[in-house]
Image (cartoon, rainbow, N blue to C red):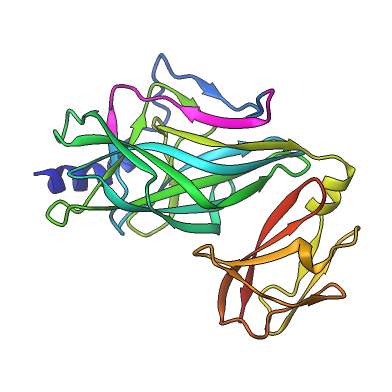
Amino acid sequence: MFIATLLAMNFAYAQQPIGNHYPNMVRTEQSIRTPDDDCSQSNPSNNFEFFGAVASDDQMVASDIFVPADEIFTLEQIIVNFNSEQGNSRVDINIWSSENDLPSSLLFFESSTPTAQNAIGTDPITNFSVFETILDLFTTFEMQGGSSGTRYWVQLKPLPISTSQPLAGWEHTSATQVGLPIAFTNKAGEWMLGSTLDGVYIFNGDCQTLDTEDNALNSLEIYPNPADSEITIATRFEINSSDIKVYTLQGKEVVVPFNNSQLDVSTLASGMYLLRIENKRNSITKKIVVN
């Protein structure tokens, strides 16, 4: 019964009527900055109104986060509610760039073991427990606001502990909307924008406003990417080998020689890596691909 219910919900996004706005809908798109530089963007629960299936390979669902111009938001923690039989053993976190207000290119991936899962109630539709799930990112991800503000998309895919009921739902709400509605993939795998639902979440992290040196870091160039043997890192300031770290997508640091603006990736296995560059005040993380 639970699987059948979630499968029916899995494609309910496409059935949401376009332009159907609820009277208590609150749409906001504002700075995520707080006075102490600890930042968060959140959308509250609406009494477990709706859970959309996100554990299946058939559909992806994402909520957006908007970073204002000349700011950097470093995502450190995600708190969401999932319904499932026994909770989830891990949650895959995918962060996408945005193009035409839809997820475009995958920028970040991490398979995260929940820091905590607390049963906080029962889903009235499936009668399964609702778990408040805390995900502390092993590798934090920096989102750049750029010169005019930048939108990103956070997609979550949990792996349920239960093998008899292997699906789980992410709580959504029609009462409040932060930024854009949820984006979801249709049966053809194409991203679409919902109309009345948004994710229930808390995105916690750190905010920084860019100054002259920060903007220099933000405007660095990395090429070629993908690369076969060497990657050039072009900046307006001096960087040393100690300023550079390279990680696998699983968060393991790998040693890569750096000299005269050249990063030697010839010894790395083919695949995607995260390049982190720091200066005295700030840092930036870029995706690199080795052929």
Question: The C terminus lies in which quarter of the figure?
Answer: bottom right
Range of residues picked out in magenta: 35-50
Extreme residue in the left direction:
1
Q: Residue at x 56, y 82 (%)?
A: 269
Q: Residue at x 46, y 27 (%)?
A: 43
Q: Quadrant of residue 127?
A: top left
Q: Residue at x 39, y 25 (%)?
A: 20
Horizontal side of residue 183 vs 273, given as left or right: left
Give 157 or 135, whichever is nearer the viewer: 135
Vertical comparison of 31 with 148: above or below: above
Horizontal side of residue 194 vs 227, given as left or right: left
Q: Residue at x 69, y 73 (%)?
A: 225
Residue 246 in picture, x, y percent from top left: 65, 67
The number of numbered badges drawn on the structure is 0
Horizontal side of residue 220 vs 207, given as left or right: right
Q: Is residue 185 visible?
A: no
